[in-house]
Image (tube, rainbow, N blue to C red):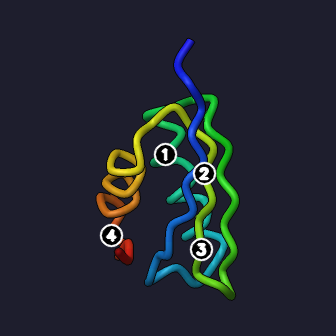
Amino acid sequence: MSDTNSHELQVKGMSCQHCVKAVTKAIQALDGSATVAVDLPQGTVTVRTTLSREATSQAISDEGYEVQA
């Protein structure tokens, strides 16, 4: 079993529960056991996953959201 990583990412463009679902689904499509917590007011996504930070960021970017450096 791979190690679990925790990533906190600043993400622009999220404004509603649809955004939360889209981001969560995108990450869980790559890692079904990932836990995703989205804070809309703060614009953060906190993820516990086996994915790398880069893969997590790419999954969010592929949904059309902008991950901040």
**Residues at badges 1 and 3 in contact (C-beta under 8 Å)?**
no
Kind of residue at disc 2: Val
Label 1, residues with CA under 10 Å away: few <14, some 14-19, many ≥20: many
Kind of residue at disc 3: Thr
Label 2: which residue? 47
Q: Horizontal and vertical percent for residue 34? A: 61, 37
**Residues at badges 2 and 1 in contact (C-beta under 8 Å)?**
yes
Q: Secondary structure at mark 2?
A: strand
Where does the N terminus fall, quadrant-wise? top right
Above or below, 4 against 63 in this view is above
Label 3: which residue? 44
Label 1: which residue? 27
For marks 2 and 3, give the CA distance: 10 Å
Q: Horizontal and vertical percent for residue 37? A: 70, 59
Q: Horizontal and vertical percent for residue 5? A: 56, 40
**Closer to the N terminus: mark 2 or mark 4?**
2
